[in-house]
Amino acid sequence: MLPTFSPTASASAATPPPRPIPGSYGPPVIGALRDRLDYFWFQSQDEFFRRRAAANRSTVFRTNIPPTFPFFVGVDPRVVAVVDAAAFTALFDSTLVDKRDILIGPYNPGAGFTGGTRVGVYLDTEEPEHGRVKEFAMALLHRGAQAWPAELRAAADAMLDAVEADLLAKQQQATGGKASASYLVPLQQCIFRFLCKALVGADPAADWVVDRFGFTILDVWLAVQLLPTQKVGVIQPLEELLIHSFPLPSFVIWPGYHLLYRFVEKHGAETVELAAREHGIGEKDAINNLLFVLGFNAFGGFSVFLPFLVAKIGEASDPAAGLRRRLREEVRATNAVRGEMPLVRSTVYEMLRMRPPVPLQFGRARKDFVLRSHGGAGFQVAKGEVLCGYQPLAMRDPEVFDRPEEFVPERFLGDEGQALLQHLFWSNGPENSQPAAGNKQCAAKEVVVDTACMLVAELFRRYDDFEVEGTSFTKLVKRQPAASSSSLSPAPAAAAEPSVK
């Protein structure tokens, strides 16, 4: 269990003196290898951090983080882990931490994956190019704001049409077992198509190869960069020997990356010109930054988060006091997204708390400083040390959240719920702060939440009910004009269509 500080300590007016950070890196090579095997093999990621916090009786401690030994040359796995909400905020202070080349930790896949460009997320706020790239990203989001809802709705309709047809076909073929239809591929196609239109200003339909295989190209591009840091589930020890022992080469992604590069160059020319005209970014760097925002930040983030959201809402047991019924009633009572669907929005926030798209955040200390935790507890951090914040524990901090391990969809409702937004860190900053050229907070923070809300709204405008197992729908109850509803099942083609308001 995550260590907590007593109420007495938290309320103390006296600030205790800083103390050394507990924990150990272990013997050279062996300590890092032991932690790597625990992280990937013997423990889950969550258990890895929980066990070390409990063993050190501290929410700030030293440990090693993969990847490491034997062929990650120049990668220092030693970090200071941070797993409480109070100390975590140091990672957002640009006067304390440097974010240069440390997006996914001490290991940097390299510019070979991004066309030779150091894209914006690998730049620190003190680098002049960071401000230009961040402003370009925010300008893209502002420009696409009007088209975003319409493009999402069109893409979501195509996705749900495909899922319905698949489920109907499998129900017709079923001989007694429960039929199911995976939504993962249709969802990724939906995400890719609407992001291309809303962000890049290019319709994938203009290139049939990109339209059909673009999302797969991005999946491979993401995987080759991230696999050295991710648990895959391959039979051990093959995973450790083949995936986690050496960096994967960037040349394997070049054919697909080049295809997407040429697509943006040709069909997103207006957006590329905007980068040069208003932000002073050359064509090559503009396209590579566009592809990173499209593929890593947007497509990658949505591909991780949205399936968790849909699966949680669609749980067959629906344990959260009839959550689907309450969401459906709220959605159908309004056409808006912001402000008028508070339960939908709170549910999205709660899922971001429980399952943040990016669980780890990193920063390198610019100088010696005292890292403050709850109750004023201080830890002496030395210049150059890498802080590793593990969000799933920091956002389940019992000092901040009541029933922290439970999914509570109403958690962020009302004044008390709004006050908790300062402890929601999924966007590389508090939810109640705003992205700017001078910080590292996700430029699309508001858009991500709104998009998730819109997807939930589309589901309940189209269906009276649905159930999900994993990444598959097992039941879809089409919206009916009458009070009674019937499950999607083998039926005539003239079955009532859902009404979309």
Image (cartoon, grey):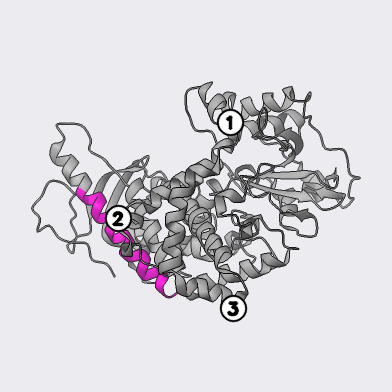
Tell me if residue 272 comes above or below residue 29 in the rendering: below
Q: Judge the density around disc 2: few (<14), some (14-19), many (≥20) Cα neighbours within 10 Å.
A: many
Dot placed on the residue nearer the N-terminal end, 1 or 3: 1
Instruction: Name the kind of residue labelled 3 in the image.
Output: Glu
Is residue 33 left or right of 392 when viewed as pictured? Answer: right
Q: Give the residue at mark 2.
A: 159
| Residue under label 1 | 244
Measured as percent of width and height from the top left, residue 309 is found at 43, 50
Select label 2 or label 3 by which is in front.
3
Q: Is residue 148 magenta?
A: yes
Q: Quadrant of residue 198?
A: bottom left
> Where is residue 201 drawn, in percent x and y?
42, 70
**Badge 3 is on which residue?**
278
Q: Pointers 1 and 3 in contact (CB under 8 A)? A: no
Report the magenta residues as a range.
Answer: 146-165
What kind of element bears circle 2?
helix
- Label 1, label 3: how far apart the Cα atoms are: 42 Å
Q: Is residue 482 visible?
A: yes
**Which is the main secondary structure of the residues drawn in magenta?**
helix
Q: CA distance from mark 1 to mark 2?
A: 35 Å
Whichever of callouts 2 and 3 sits on the residue coming sooner in the sequence is 2
The residue drawn where x is 17% and y is 51% is 486
Q: Nearer the viewer, residue 201 or 62?
A: 201
Q: Amino acid at mark 2?
A: Met
Looking at the image, is mark 1 or mark 2 earlier in the sequence? Answer: 2
Q: For numbered disc 1, what is the local secondary structure?
A: loop
